[in-house]
Image (cartoon, grey):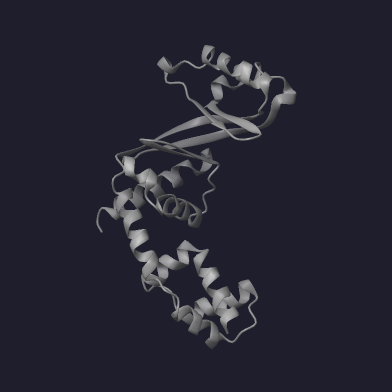
Amino acid sequence: MTNIVKKVWKTIDNSPCIQRNMYRGLINSRALAKYIIKEKKIDATIDAVISAIRRYELNQYEELFTTAQNMIIQTVNLSTRSQLAGISLIKDTDTQKILPKLFNIIQYVRGDVLRIIQANESIKILIDEKNMENVLDLFSKDKIVTIDKELAEINMHIHPKMQITLGVLATITNELTINGINIVDAITCSPEMLWFVKEEDLLKAYNVLYQLCKSNKTM
């Protein structure tokens, strides 16, 4: 029985959507038990799984999500940009030497975009598609890992404390995910939080984030 409880609780732990709807009273315990048994292939009776579900402590999450949602209220505004491209480059000395040349191409006074993300093995730059060919000309083909076109950016101007509030990112990513929106990239640079999606998902993603902020203000 203990093993069954652990499996059921782990399933709920890994699903913020289930947790949220459980403490809102929107999930039928029997239906959830059938889902867990089928999806996780748990060898147990429905009654045993229902018992484990009912013993799951939700109070530990209620305050977390409430705090996160209340912090999202503090979003100052949302803005969007489209026609962006992402270029991933091998991170080495040659690439490092070339990167400063980007500033001869990117014109901030014209409102050009330049976002740079550095990882252990690669560097990703996000730019306007209109500048893509000029940027690609700087690097040899063997330095280019991937090229992703037709991207869009949603800029959330956030409250400084949002970045350090537990559950904010989980709440936002959960809302986008359950609405079928793939997050291509995300960057936090206080006071801004940037979400990158495919252009075809931009309008839907914007509406999801707008409703998330707006609906919280009525709480």
Residue name at image x 63 percent, y 78 percent: 42
Left or right side of 140 for 108 = left
> In the rendered image, which quarter contains the N terminus?
bottom right
Residue name at image x 54 percent, y 82 percent: 49
- Give residue 149's position: percent from left, percent from top: 59, 32
Left or right side of 125 for 189 = left
Residue name at image x 49 percent, y 57 percent: 178
Q: Relative to the observer, which residue lies in front, 134 or 166? A: 166
Measured along the vertical axis of the image, is residue 118 above or below residue 198? above
Q: Quadrant of residue 184?
A: top right
Measured along the vertical axis of the image, is residue 187 above or below residue 179? above
Left or right side of 38 for 116 = left
Measured along the vertical axis of the image, is residue 44 above or below residue 93? below
Measured along the vertical axis of the image, is residue 61 above or below residue 186? below
Number of numbered markers: 0
- Give residue 190's position: percent from left, percent from top: 38, 35
Residue name at image x 43 percent, y 18 percent: 108
Left or right side of 18 for 124 = right
> In the rendered image, which quarter contains the C terminus?
bottom left
**Which residue extends farthest right?**
142
- Give residue 125's position: percent from left, percent from top: 56, 28
Q: Relative to the observer, which residue lies in front, 1 or 133? A: 1
Q: Relative to the observer, which residue lies in front, 20 or 163? A: 163
Q: Relative to the observer, which residue lies in front, 49 or 29? A: 49
Q: Quadrant of residue 138?
A: top right
**Which residue extends farthest top?**
104
**Which residue extends farthest left?**
218
- Give residue 156's position: percent from left, percent from top: 38, 39
